[in-house]
Amino acid sequence: MDPPSSAARRASVIAGHLLGPYQSIANFSSSPVTPSPCLNYSPPDLSEKPPAFDVAALRRILDGHHHEARDWLFHLMEESPLFCPRRRGEFTFVAPDYNQTKEQQRAATMRRIEYLLGQGVFQGWFTGSDPEAGMRKLALFECIAVFDHSLSIKLGVHYFLWGGAINFLGTKRHHDKWLNASENFQVKGCFAMTELGHGSNVRGIETIATYDIDSGEFVINTPCESAQKYWIGGAANVGKVFHSTHTIIFSQLLINGTNQGVHAFIAQIRDNEGNICPNVRIADCGHKIGLNGVDNGRIWFDNIRIPRENLLNSVADVLPDGRYVSSIKDPDQRFAAFLAPLTSGRVNIAATAVYISKVGLAIAVRYALTRRVFSITADGPEVLLLDYPAHQRRLLPLVAKTCAMSSAANFLKRLYVNRTPESNKSVHIYSSALKATLTWNNMRVLQECREACGGQGLKTENRIGILKAEFDVQSTFEGDNNVLMQQVSKALLAEYIAAKKRKHPFRGLGLEHMNDPCPVIEANPTSSTLRSTEFQLNIICLRERDLLTRYASEVSRFQADGESKVNAALLSYQLADELARAFSERTILQIFIKEETTQSPGRLKDVLGLLRSMYALTCVEEDASFLRYGYLSRDGAAAARREVSKLCGDLRPHALSLVNSFGIPDSFLSPIAFDWIEANSWSTVNDE
Amino acid sequence: MDPPSSAARRASVIAGHLLGPYQSIANFSSSPVTPSPCLNYSPPDLSEKPPAFDVAALRRILDGHHHEARDWLFHLMEESPLFCPRRRGEFTFVAPDYNQTKEQQRAATMRRIEYLLGQGVFQGWFTGSDPEAGMRKLALFECIAVFDHSLSIKLGVHYFLWGGAINFLGTKRHHDKWLNASENFQVKGCFAMTELGHGSNVRGIETIATYDIDSGEFVINTPCESAQKYWIGGAANVGKVFHSTHTIIFSQLLINGTNQGVHAFIAQIRDNEGNICPNVRIADCGHKIGLNGVDNGRIWFDNIRIPRENLLNSVADVLPDGRYVSSIKDPDQRFAAFLAPLTSGRVNIAATAVYISKVGLAIAVRYALTRRVFSITADGPEVLLLDYPAHQRRLLPLVAKTCAMSSAANFLKRLYVNRTPESNKSVHIYSSALKATLTWNNMRVLQECREACGGQGLKTENRIGILKAEFDVQSTFEGDNNVLMQQVSKALLAEYIAAKKRKHPFRGLGLEHMNDPCPVIEANPTSSTLRSTEFQLNIICLRERDLLTRYASEVSRFQADGESKVNAALLSYQLADELARAFSERTILQIFIKEETTQSPGRLKDVLGLLRSMYALTCVEEDASFLRYGYLSRDGAAAARREVSKLCGDLRPHALSLVNSFGIPDSFLSPIAFDWIEANSWSTVNDE
C-alpha cells in the first residue's frame, strides 16, 4: 500500500482533466501561483552558528564526574529491545511505553532491571564503599532516571533505602548477611517507613515492636488501619521476579512499658517463590499519575515474629535479656540517626531533578530553534520561536539556572560521599535545601518547556509532559519540600543564635559572609557592575543576612509575646521560606562562581560568566524580597531586569551549544528535538 | 477469606502465650502502656463549626445558573455503571479508569456519550439557540468535564467546534442539512484547523482548496507533510461508534491564482460503516499525558473533491462560475470572522477551568481538615494541616481566587450567549484574557493542592494529580495563553491610541476608570482601608492605568528608534504581559464586587467581602509590579501582606462551608476528601 504515490497519480489524472485557469492551480507542480513553499526542517546543528566554546569541556563541568560511565550505560540501554527503541524518521528513540497498564509497566521495569544486572551495572553498588564508587553509582543512577523514573525508583528503594538502612543502621552481622546477597538481587529489599497516617512526621508512626524474652524474638504489629505501611515501593508486585522478599520495618520499640521511639528491623515478607509470609498482608497502592512501573504497596503486620538479631543495632540494641542499650542517650539525636538513609535519597533526588531539567530544556530549546511561527514583516518568513524575545526569556534563564544547579548537585554529591560525622549537619541542611530547590525548579522547567512546545509537549513520545507526571513526586517524597525548607531556616536560626550568644564568628554553611561588614549596594548599578561577581555575591548575601536577622527577630518577638518556640517559628513561616530560598540561591551561586574561577581564561569561561550572571540576576528578578525589603532601589531592580533581557540576547547564540553540553544522547530526547516533520510523515505511520 | 479477623484471632493466641511484662504490650487491648490511641477520622462536617452563612445561597451565586440541571446531570452520571462507580468505605466515587490503554479509554468515552445521548442530555444543544439554552449547555458541559476532560472534549469538538463552525460560518443550507443530523449524532463531526506546521498562526496553514468550474467542486489538497491536519479530536478512532464521519476543513482558498486566505469547508471523511473515504488518509496522534479518551488524529487530503455548496459561505462565497464574493472586504477582518467558532471554545475552557479548580480545592481543603501532622506541644495531639498558618496561606487565597473567577466565568458566559455584532470585540478580548488567566490559575491550584495532599495527591483515585495531566492542555489549546495575553494588551493599546488621538473618553472593556483622575494611594493604609472596596479598586486600577501608559510609551519609543510596529510590540513583551494580567485581575475584581453589591446585608455578604478582600490583596501581594513601579510604598506592600495572613485566619472557620458551596457532589470528589482511613482499610482491598 502506497497512498501518497497513488494519491499523486490520482491528482495528476484529475489535473489532466481540468480545463481553464484552474487547471494549473489544482495541479500545483507547475503553477506559477503556488503558495509559499512548504515548511522545511533545518537541523539546528547546521542552521545555527558553530559552537563558540568547547562543548565537550562544558559537559565535563556540568556532569562533573563519570561521563564515560554515563555514556556506557546510556549505550547499554539504547541497544536493548527492552528499552523500547522506536524508529522515527532517521532517528531511534528509547522511552517506556506509557500506553500500558500499571501491571505491564511493572513487568517491563523488572525485565529492565534483570538486563542491567546481567550487564554488571550494579556491580559494587553495595560492596564498593569508597567515595569514587559512590560517585559512580550516583552518576549511573541519574542516567537510569533519564530513561524512566520508575526504573530508578525501583532500584533506589533496593540500593539506597534498603541497602542504606542496612549499611547505616546495621552492624557487621547485618552487612555480612545481607549486603552481598542484595547486590545481586538474591534478596530483594523494600523500606517500610511511611504509614497511612504518618508521612513527614515519622516519629508519630503507630507500628509497634515488642520483645519476647522467651523466644528471643521481636513481635511487630500493625495495631490499626492508620498504621498500615503505605507507599512501600517494591512491596506490592504480584509478579514472580524482583518483588521484594524482605523489608526494613520502622516501628516504635516498646521495652518494659517504655516507648524507646522509632527503630528499624529487618523482616522477611515473601518466600523465594513469591508467596507472602504468614501474618503479613499486602495490598496495592493503586494507579498513580506517574511511577506506574513501581509497585507501591501497603503492608499490615499481624504480630509477626523476627529474630532479635534483625534489629538494626548500630544506634541501639536490645540484649537477649531484654535490656535496652544505646550509645546515644538523647532521644532526639537517636531518632535523627534513624533517618540517615533518607539523606542519600535526597542527594539522589536533587541530582536527578537537574538531569531531568536538562532533558526538558534540550528538547524545548532544540524545538524552538526549528519551529517557526508568525511573520513579523508582510510576506516575510515566519520567525523561529527562539528568536522571539519573549521565548528567550522563558527558556534561557532556566538554562542558566539548570547549569548552576548542576554544579550544586555535584557539590552535594561530593559532600555526601565524603561525609564524616562532623559534616553530618551540613549534609543534612544542604541536602534538604538543594533537594527542595532543585526539584521545584525541575517542575517549573518542565511546565515552561511543555507550554513552550505547545501541544507537542503533551505527547508522551516527546517526553516533557510525561516527565512532569513522573517527577512530580519529587517535591513531596523523602521529605516534603516545604517541611525541608522550614527545617533549613530553623537550622540557620540555631546558627545565628549560637553565634550571637557566644559571640563567635559564623563558621560553616557558607555563612562566613555574616562576619563581614554589611555590603553596600549601588542605587544605580551599571551593566558591568550588574555582571560582576562582586555585585552579585553582595546582593545575594545581603538578602540572606537581612532575612536571617529578620527571621530571628520575628521569632523572638513572637516568643516575647508569649508564644512557644515552636509556635513562634510556625507563625514566622513566610520569613522562613524567604530565608531558606535565600540560603539555597546563595549556596548555588557560590558553588557556580567557584566552578567558573577554576577555568582558565577563554571562551568557555566567558560563557560560564554569562550563565552565572543570568543565574544571579534571575534570582534577583524573580524574588520580590529585593524590593520588599529594599535590598535594591527601584532603579536598581529595573536595571537588573533589563540586564536579564540583555543576557537573553547574549546567550541566544549559545543556546544550542549549551543544551548540547547537557550530554543527553539524542535517543533519550524526542522527535520534536530533531526533524519533527519527517518523524510525523505518513511514511512513518506504520513504524509507530 | 477474612484476614483481619483471622489475624486478630492469631494475635490473641500469640498474646496468650506470652509471659512477663511484654504480654500485655503485645496484646494491646489491656496494656497500661498502650501507645497513644490510633488515629481516628473525624468527619469535618461534624468537627468543624456549622456554616456561618447560607451555603446553598453561595452555591447559587458561584454556579450562577442552572444548578438544578447540573445536579440532574451529575446524578445521571452517578447512577450509570459506565461511569465506573467504585465503593470505598461508605462512599461511592465515580471517575474514569486511568489504568487503561488509550484504546480502552476511547471506547469508554464513546459508550458514555451514547448513554448521555440516550438520556437526552444534548437535546437542544444545536437547535435551541436562545441565550438560556446556551447557558444550560455551558452548565452541563462544565459538569461533564468534572467527570472527565476527555468526555467533554470529545463532545466539545462535535457540539462547539463542528457545530459552531456550521452555525457561525455556514448559512441556511448548511444549518438545514447538518444541524439536526448532528444533534443526535447521525453525523459526527470534527474540526480540522490546526496543522503539524501551524497552530497559533492559523493564517499560515498550507492546505489548499481550488475550485473546479466544470464539476462545480472544490479540490482540497495537503501539499506537504507539514500541512497534515494535526490534533484533530475525534478523527483518529478506529472503532465503529461515534468516530467522526465529517470534518470542517480550514484551507487556503486559491481563486484565479489569488489566495483569498483561510476558508472553511465541510467534507466527509468516513462512510456510515466507518470506512475512511477515498483520497483521505488518517493516522493517530498517539498517546498523550491526558485526554487519552479523545482520539486526536492526523489527516491528509489527496485532492479530495467536495461540492461547491460545502464551502461555509456566511463570510464569503464562490459562485458557480468561479467568481469570489465576500461581504467583508478587509482580509484581516475576513480572517478574524473565520476564527469565531474558537471563541465559544475559550468561554467554555475558562468556565471549565474554574470548576476543576473547585474540585481540587474541595478535596485538598477537606483533607487538610482531617489530616494531622506533628504536635506543637510535647505529647500534645497532632495538628490539623489547615490549622497551620502556612497551610492556610497555601490554600485559602486560592479558594478566594477561585470564587472570584467563578463569577468572572459567569459574566463571560452571559456576555457570550447574549453577544451582538457590537460586542464581538469585547467578547474576544474578555474571552482571551479570562481563558488564559483562569486556566493558568487552575494549573497552579491543582499543583498546590497536589503538594498540599502529599503523596495522596498522586493517586489517580484522588483526582487532583490526574486532573493536572488532563487539563494541562488548556494553557495552549484554542489559543496559546501567552499569545492570547499579548493580543489583549495589543487591543488595549489600540483603545489607548484611539482615545488619545481622538481625545475621546475611554468607553468599554471597563476602561472608564482611565477617564478619572489618577487615584491616590495611602502610604500607610490601615487594615480597614486595605479591606475597603475603594482602596482595592483604586490600587488595581492604578496598576492597569500606569501599565497601559507605560506600554504605549515603550512601544512608541521603540518605533521612534526605527523598529516596526510589530517589532516594537514584540520587544515590549514584558509590559504587555504585566498589562494583560492587570486588565484580567481588574476585570475579575469588578465583577466580583458587583456580585457582592447585589447581596442584601448579612453573613453571606460578609463572607463575600472577605473573599473579595482576599482576592484583591492576593493580587497585590503576588505581583511584584506594585513595588517595581511604586504603586504601593514598601510599608503599604508589607501591610497588604500582613492583611492576607489575617484574612487567612478570618476565612479559616469558613473553609469547609466555602468548598461545600462549590456544589461538587461527594461522589465526584475522592476518598481523601472523606474517611480516608476507612477507604484504605484492609476490608476494602477487594473492592478496588
Image (cartoon, coloured by chain):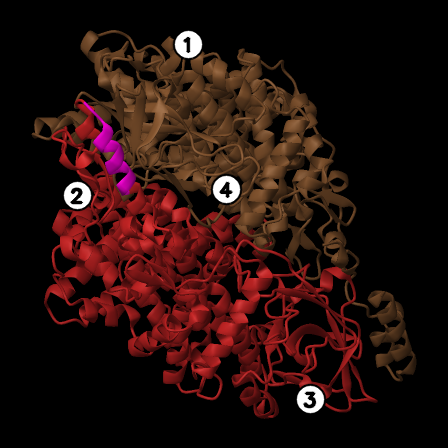
Chain colours: A brown, B red
Q: Disc 4 vs disc 1: Cβ atoms closer than 8 Å?
A: no
Is disc 3 in the same subunit as disc 2? yes
Residue A470, x across and y down, in percent:
51, 43
Predominant SS of the magenta segment:
helix
Kindly identify the amino acid type of the residue bearing the numbered disc 3. Glu
The residue drawn where x is 14% and y is 35% is: B30
Q: Is residue A2 above or below residue A232?
A: below
Q: Secondary structure at mark 4?
A: loop
| Left or right side of B563 for A55 | right
Q: CA distance from mark 1 to mark 3?
A: 82 Å
- Is-magenta flag for residue B622? no
Is disc 3 in the same subunit as disc 4? no
Q: Which residue is mark 4?
A: A237
Q: CA distance from mark 2 to mark 1?
A: 52 Å
Q: Which numbered mark, 3 or 2, is in the foreground of this view? A: 3
Residues shaded magenta: B8-19
State which chain disc 2 sits on. Answer: B
Q: CA distance from mark 3 to mark 4?
A: 60 Å
Q: Which residue is mark 3?
A: B309
What crowding class fits label 3: few (fewer than 14 Cα within 10 Å), some (14-19), or many (20 or more)?
Answer: some
Tell me the number on the disc at residue B524. Answer: 2
Q: Which numbered mark, 4 or 2, is in the foreground of this view? A: 4
Kindly identify the amino acid type of the residue bearing the numbered disc 2. Asn
What crowding class fits label 1: few (fewer than 14 Cα within 10 Å), some (14-19), or many (20 or more)?
Answer: few
